[in-house]
Image (cartoon, grey):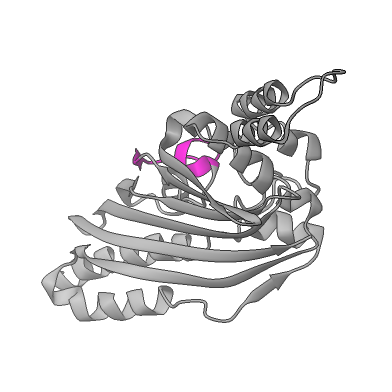
Amino acid sequence: MEMKRFFASAIALILALSVLSGCGEKQPVSSVPDVTQAENVTDSTEVFSENLTEAVPENTTETVSQTEIEETTAEAVPSTVEEIVAYFNTSVNKVKPTAKKVVKNYEKRIVNEEKLVLPAGLESTARSMISTFMKDDTEPIVYETREDITNEFIVPGQSYASRLKPEWVKSATLTDNGSQNIVRIILKDQNDPTAGNGVGSVCDVIEVHEVAEKASFVKKFTADYYNCEIVATIDKASGNVVNIRYVTPVALEMTVDLFGTHDGSVGLTFEKDYTITY
């Protein structure tokens, strides 16, 4: 009976890790990107567009000095959280409808030892299972068809790559890097996010209902995302994101009802890095 209890906990762990390892391989909702939807992602995009409109002087017969031009350009640079989020959304949502090639340079899968709680008798076996599911993708993977880019790039299977709203953001900064802008966004922590909402609006996430659908014996399953970070390199001239990295730490807790009730937890961090060509 003791081994059966261990086996139950192992199943829960394998289930969680197998679902997580499948992120990016979900069935597409639509294989044809909705360009209109991608371009009109959030109301915050309108904020940035309005700011740009206000920053550009109307045609006039008066002579505009070089100093005035430089001041106007400076005012148009996104600086508030709302403006940076709108700028980021507009840029990253060009990927699925227009990119010629997306390369996933790597994906790291890291186990947070501080959040790993396993039955003592199962620890060796569980760690072996974790190492199997949590192997890094070290070789680049190239996506060149519209279908592959839509299905494999963040958010998988959707026509958009971000529906991020300012209220879901902890901090957002933009750094001028010559011909490029570097946007760094830290998301607010979220418990059990769903696709299109919060962390799930801009990152690949595991949804609680997916686990329930796969195994009825999992009575409780939570996914707490914290300190999720996005760093995007955006070409100034075109407004296209040319490189982007996602770091998504998550703490999973579960209760399994199989030959008794058993609890377990594991902390995981996923890091994905992409290069985009247009």
Residue drawn at the location 65% of the way across and 48% of the way down: 92
Give the side of residue 217 with respect to residue 148, left or right: left
- Relative horizontal placement of residue 11, taking residue 274 as reference (left or right): left
Q: How many marks?
A: 0
x, y percentage for residue 7?
26, 70
Q: Residue at x 78, y 40 (%)?
A: 34
**Quadrant of residue 85 in the image?**
top right
Percent position of residue 265, x then y:
24, 58
In the rendered image, the quadrant that contains the N terminus is bottom left
**Foreground of the two, 80 or 27:** 80
- Per the rendered image, the range of residues in magenta is 189-201
Q: Position of residue 76 (x, y in %)?
A: 63, 33
Q: Is residue 11 above or below residue 167?
A: below
- Please provide percent x and percent y for residue 155: 60, 50
Residue ID at (63%, 47%): 161
Q: Judge whether residue 108 is colored magenta.
A: no
Q: Is residue 193 magenta?
A: yes
Q: Locate residue 44 relative to residue 31 in the image: left or right.
A: left
Which quarter of the rendered picture does the C terminus lie within? Answer: bottom right
Query: Between residues 275 and 35, which one lies in front from this camera angle?
Result: 275
